[in-house]
Amino acid sequence: MTKLLNEFWVTFSSIFTGLGVTWRHLFKRSVTVQYPEERLEMPKGVRHQLYVNIDDCIGCNLCSKACPVNCIEIETVKSTDEDDLGETSTGHKKRLWVTKFDIDMAKCMYCDLCVPPCPTDCIYMIEDYEYSKYDRDDLIFKFSDLSPEKVEEVKKKAEEEAARKKAEKEKQAAKKKAEKEKKQAEGKKDEKDKKDSPKTSKD
């Protein structure tokens, strides 16, 4: 009998405890946010989606090297002598075409380690956290503004210029080598002439 009474007491006390919590909050102001019509203000320094201002990117690859999960992929092509890529907003001279700048936000761990190394402050986090997708590949954000045709064009020009400079360098090296061999041959000839010439005796 005592055991039965104890079970009843525990049951009803737990019920009334729960109801007490409910009654205490019943007449208080609701704190539920009716998302997406209502949105909470995000705290300062919160980490969201990464964004790249590609116009200020110099292709230094420092952000990619700092990333611990390798979610940033960057490919660059050296500009030719006739290309003028201009400067960034921070005054840095642009010498590389950024043909690829992809960030896989599915891999990103929001550590923010890629932001401080950037010398032009072109990579940073924006207040956008609503980018869920049905396909994981859609979480790869591409920031390079070069078309595939333009990429092929700059690669071809860079290869042609590199080949031309290499040929010119080899030509100059061959010319210097020929001049050096010619001087050595002339020096040997002069030494031979000195040895073959008769010695004059002094009176």
Image (cartoon, rainbow, N blue to C red):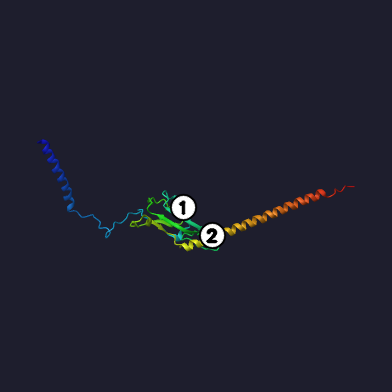
Which of the 4 quarters of the picture holds residue 14?
A: top left
Please report the residue visible at 73 percent of the width from the left and 51 percent of the height from the top: 184
Q: With 60 as the anchor, is 173 left or right in this view?
A: right
Looking at this view, name the residue that lies furthest to the left.
Answer: 1
Q: With 162 as the anchor, is 128 left or right in this view?
A: left
- In the image, residue 165 above or below residue 11: below
Q: Position of residue 108 (x, y in %)?
A: 38, 52
Q: Position of residue 39 (x, y in %)?
A: 28, 58
Please report the residue visible at 63 percent of the width from the left and 56 percent of the height from the top: 170
What is the secondary structure assignment of the residue under circle 1? helix
Looking at this view, name the residue that lies furthest to the top.
Answer: 2
Q: Please give the label number shown on residue 158.
A: 2
The kind of residue tagged 2 is Ala
Q: Are marks 1 and 2 in contact (CB under 8 Å)?
A: no
Quick check: can you spot residue 189?
Answer: yes
- Report the residue marked by disc 1: 62
For the residues carrying marks 1 and 2, which lies nearer the camera in this image? 2
Q: CA distance from mark 1 to mark 2?
A: 23 Å
